[in-house]
Amino acid sequence: MTAITDINQLDFSKNYTYADYLTWHFKEKIELIKGKIIAMSPAPTRRHQDIAQNINRILDNFFYKKPCKVYFSPFDVRLYSPSKDITTVVQPDLCVICDLNKLDDKGCLGSPDLVVEIVSPGNSKKEMGIKFDLYEEVGVREYWIVNPGEETILIYVLQDGKYIGMRPLAKGETTTAHSVIFPELNFNVADVFLE
């Protein structure tokens, strides 16, 4: 296949696969969701990066020497479509994978156990809508949506194939957050939003 070096060479109305994705060599960051190209926000803000690092520190400390791995963006998570083709490639801000057989040199093939997405200006619709539905559909067991502007964390847990929302967590109102699928994982909400 011919390498694509300019995003303008792509037809945004067309459906693509992971094989196509591997031929794209341009500077813009994109994700592929059910065959459709989704442009990612420009480089994350410093605040976004601070929050990602704070969450990474919490997760890394908890999972250190445990049989799960923590990864942060850019890290390709490839998800199957019903036809068994890979038509979805996302790059969650952070994810935890406990089935190490899903890992290879290209990233993760299959659903992570936990996904964390940090809302950036201009991408809240994607995180709240498209990705919420996607992660629910592919069986991500727990999904956190972190909103830097509101300093809130929304935690959803998969029950009978549908996400159930836990009580919203807000800096200053709630002191401790708890993972549902990893009950011993708890942390101070304010620590997520430290600058």
Image (cartoon, grey):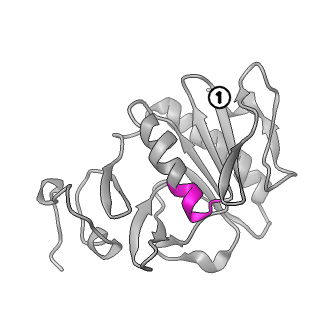
Nearest the eye: 22 or 141: 141
Type of residue at label 1?
Answer: Thr
**Quick one: label 1, few (<14), some, or many (20+) residues within 10 Å?**
many
Q: Let me know if residue 92 appears in the view.
A: no
Q: Is residue 162 left or right of residue 74?
A: right
Residue beneath label 1, please? 152
Q: Which residue is located at x 54 percent, y 23 percent?
A: 149
In x, y percent, where is residue 101? 63, 80
Q: Which residue is located at x 60 percent, y 42 percent?
A: 53
In x, y percent, where is residue 69? 67, 65
Residue furthest out toward the left: 9
Q: What main secondary structure does the magenta stretch of the protein show?
A: helix
Q: Which residue is located at x 59 percent, y 56 percent?
A: 136
Rendered image quadrant of residue 51: top right
Q: The magenta stretch spans which residues? A: 134-140
Judged from the image, the secondary structure of the residue bearing numbered disc 1 is: strand
